[in-house]
Image (cartoon, rainbow, N blue to C red):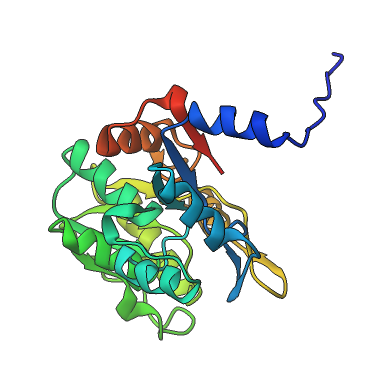
Amino acid sequence: MATTKKVTQRLACDSFKQWIQGLDAFLFDCDGVLWRGAAPIEGAANMINLLRSLNKRVVFVTNNATNSRATYVKKLASQGITAVEADIVTSAWATAQYMKQHKIEGKVYIVGEAGLKTELELEGYKVSGLEHSDIKGLPHVPDIDMETKAVVCGLDRYFTYYKMAYATACVRQIPGCHFIGTNPDSTYPTDGAIIPGGGSLVHMLECSIGHPPEAVCGKPSQDLLQTIVATYKLDPSRTCMV
């Protein structure tokens, strides 16, 4: 099938003004858009300030589930960008919202980091999993908590075989235990290299569990889009994703 290539064009000043007047809100990705690793991307903070001066709603949307929204407030500040938690959407927060909307209650086991744990706990979930970061190999068959109602997997830079075994056992052995991914990203950009992303661990668990997650809550999930539109009362036709 033939494909049509679209050529990007640099807008003239008047065209840019006309385009931006037709928009009410801007959703900005963070990693690779506002910064790469610890290094800010030139001009990003100035653009945010310009949009705000034009009374545009700015929301920061990231698939990185390792940090809480509170941590992202500090990260943005370090890049010269002022924000509050209400300006930030992470895949960890989105996962917690998905679980609330689908009335998933009870204990949660995470393959993830502190930011994911924090966002789930803020919604009232009892979360475990971080305590297994130091267990090497498989010293014993995991003695799982049979009250676990969901396994949530995201980027985990302290991932261990034991965590994988525990999470797999929960979904396979506990009737009705949910399997949810925070985001589908196979890779993650840093200032020095491209490293494995949260989606690579989700796929690993999918293989051992035997079926895909019921939901992957980060971008480009339709559930996430609907949650953002509802939370910030946006008109999708007047919203730009960067």
Residue found 48% across the figure and 71% down from its top: 80
Whole-percent x and y of residue 77?
Answer: 41, 72
Residue found 35% across the figure and 78% down from its top: 132
In the figure, 236 relative to 31: above or below? above
Whole-percent x and y of residue 104?
Answer: 19, 43
Residue found 43% across the figure and 43% down from its top: 54
Which is more toward the observer, 222 or 155?
222
Whole-percent x and y of residue 154?
Answer: 44, 59
Residue 14 lies in quadrant: top right
Residue 56 lies in quadrant: top left
The N terminus appears in which quarter of the rendering? top right
Residue found 51% across the figure and 74% down from its top: 157
Residue reaching furthest right? Answer: 2
* Number of numbered discs overlaid on the protein picture: 0
In the figure, 91 relative to 234: above or below? below
Q: Is residue 88 left or right of residue 18?
A: left
Which is more toward the observer, 225 or 78?
78
In the figure, 103 relative to 140: above or below? above
Which is more toward the observer, 56 or 211?
56
Residue reaching furthest front? Answer: 14
Asked whether residue 150 appears in the rendered view, the answer is: yes
Q: Is residue 37 left or right of residue 238?
A: right
Residue reaching furthest top? Answer: 1
Whole-percent x and y of residue 84?
Answer: 29, 61
Asked whether residue 145 appears in the rendered view, the answer is: no
Which is more toward the observer, 162 or 234?
234
Q: Is residue 26 left or right of residue 187?
A: left
